[in-house]
Amino acid sequence: MRLLPLAFLFSSTLAPLAFAAVRETHPFGVRDLVAFDRISEARLSPDGAWIVFTVSAVDLEANKRRSDLWLSSIDGTQVRKLTRHEAADTSGVFAADGKSILFLSTRGGSSQIWRLALTGGEPEPVTALPLDVGSFTLSSDGSRIAFSMEVFPETTPEATKKKLDEEAARKSSGRIYDSLFIRHWDTWADGRRSHVFVMPASGGAAVDVMKAMDADVPSKPFGDASEYTFTPDGRAIVFGARDAGREEAWSTNFDLFVAPVDASAPPRNLTAANKAWDAFPVFSPDGRTLAYLAMKRPGSESDRFRIVLRAWPDGTERVLTESWDRSPAELAWSPDGKEIYCAADDLGRRAIFAVDAATGKARTLERGGHASSPLAAGRSVVFQMDSLKGPAELYVTPASGGASRPITSLNADRLAAARLGEPEQISFKGARGDTVYAWVVKPVDFDAKKKYPVAFLIHGGPEGSFADEFHYRWNPQTYAGHGYAAVMVDFHGSTGYGQAFTDAIQGDWGGKPLEDLKKGLESVLAKYPWMDGTKVAALGASYGGYMINWIAGNWPDRFTCLVAHDGNLDERMAYFTTEELWFPEAEHGGVPWEHPEGYARHNPIDYVKNWKTPTLVVHSAKDFRVVETGGLATFTALQRKGIPSRLLYFPDENHWVLKPQNSILWHDTVLDWLDRWTLRGGR
């Protein structure tokens, strides 16, 4: 089907993607970082010829990012901004006939579903519900909409709104809790759950298909519409949920459930036999197979996902990728149903793979940077990709294999204006003699005859990776632009190197990872004589912040200064103050009253006596993952010992620093601290 009305949208005055040459350039910095447009949520038209996607742009005056919808042809020859509104427009999805786009917008004062005809005109509201819509998806024929709203279980949206108004009006402020979670990520619990509702696309009553379930779909805090889908006939919804009751805070037992769209029967558990994580259901094009992702190890969030295929509707299952030692994500079926496209971390990059639906054999489609969100577009695959050399754009590659090419280049002018450091991946022998990978980003305007200071960055997770990625909080180019060489080691525990390598950190937080960091730094200093080994600063957040505190007591003479962002000081107490208890229980071998040795083995607080390195501490009030007392305690210890130290505290941020002006302050403060102790000798 051709979308002929789209020609209406593209005039001869449309600005071309080729930008004028930039005459003046400057070293990359944080103000460049926050200024980039950020692409997300790409979705294809029914014929695979067009892409609707979300672009957020910074508004420094308002100290936030604004989101609008954009439209592009798959060949990138026509790219246009679809919406221009002060409200947030996100999550665009083509209607089944391809003639309009449904999307979320706050333009009516709350988050609701709107419709924009591609022949022109103003958007029109589809929903006018008393509560915010959080996410949505469409049935394959477009006749029904499934969406999420936060409600009190066993109540209607109207009753929930009334109760919220009553709560806001009461004079007392106290809350009473009988079970965990009492708070999660950055939000205090108030009894509401995110439930999936279904309504006719033409309008009508919304039905809660989860009814009395005490569970969230999508999952909190980062879930989205990929966690639920219509069945092929449109008569039911399949969704992933953790229905764990009072064990929710220490359970990773997500299951797939199926519920009729009219809520005539309660949800039925499809994966009760697996006590680990089951999620992200995607039906094959012929509707005969349900693919989803599953872990095997209960209580773990860092076990690898396997692709599981379930015959629909009879339920016969087989694990497709048991022999593939990678953890796939973001599944998309090929149009003929013979392959499944996915993204997975792979040796310091994030690659797009095609997995044979019969054999489970994986072949690489793209491995050039940090690729994600594959979409099947006929004989092509559309995906999003960024790298250490620039932010995400949309790309397309032949499904049969071949060179990828960009579809968009929204940030080309900004990239041309900023000079970047050159990245290079290296490897060395780390703990246990294993091969360990690292990234080095050379300083901007690099001169091999000069000596450069080093910013030694330590990633969080700890099951994560400092990959070939354009990160918006820990971007090595901000250090390279400031004249530092950036070094990032993917120590034992990092993802993309096989499950055994990832699991090697459990019960050994301060062991093999610290050995890898030591050997990695030694290796790069030997390899690159232009690095000044006498001027090295170490920085980290989350687990990286823990490692900075561990380094302070167990490698105290190496660094000119340290930066500890959102790091634990006392692993024993951290267990009792965090929210997701399954994480420390998996990492340290159980609960601390039964396995105290796991929490004492590598506990930074026991080595404060050895601290001597000047340290900048960063923490935020709304961080419920690593609570603010961890940072305050670290600063207290530094101050009491008379160690030069500074505290940067954000009362309005969570585990991440997200507001543009706060990001600028963070980077300016961190770089000033590095300069003071690495270049100016403490002055």
Image: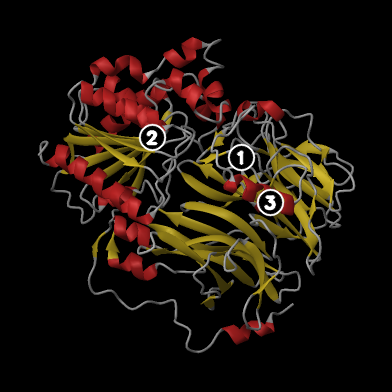
The CA span between labels 2 and 1 is 25 Å
Q: Is residue 662 visible?
A: yes
Q: Which label's residue is closer to the chain start, 2 or 1?
A: 1
* Mark before the other along the chain sequence, 3 or 2: 3
Q: CA distance from mark 3 to mark 2?
A: 38 Å
Placement of 6 over or under 166, stated as above or below? below
Q: Say if residue 338 shows up in the picture.
A: no
Earlier along the polypeptide chain: callout 3 or callout 1? 3
Residue 133 position (above or below residue 671): below
- Classify mark 2: residues with Cα within 10 Å, few (<14), some (14-19) or many (20+): many
Q: Secondary structure at mark 2?
A: loop
Q: Position of residue 34 (x, y in %)?
A: 36, 58
296 to the left or right of 568: right
Quarter holding the C terminus is top left
Instruction: Tell me how far mark 3 sits from mark 1, CA to CA.
Output: 14 Å
- Residue 475 or residue 173, whichever sits in front: 173
Which mark lies nearer to you, 3 or 1? Answer: 3
Q: Residues within 10 Å of mark 3 (few under 14, many from 20)?
A: few
Residue placed under numbered mark 3 in the picture: 162
The label on residue 566 is 2
Decide: is 488 above or below 429: below
Contact (Cβ within 8 Å) of mark 3 with mark 2: no
Which amino acid type is shown beneath numbered disc 1?
Asp
Q: Which mark is residue 606?
A: none
Question: Furthest-front residue in view?
Answer: 171
Q: Residue at x 70, y 61 (%)?
A: 129
- Residue ID for mark 1: 190
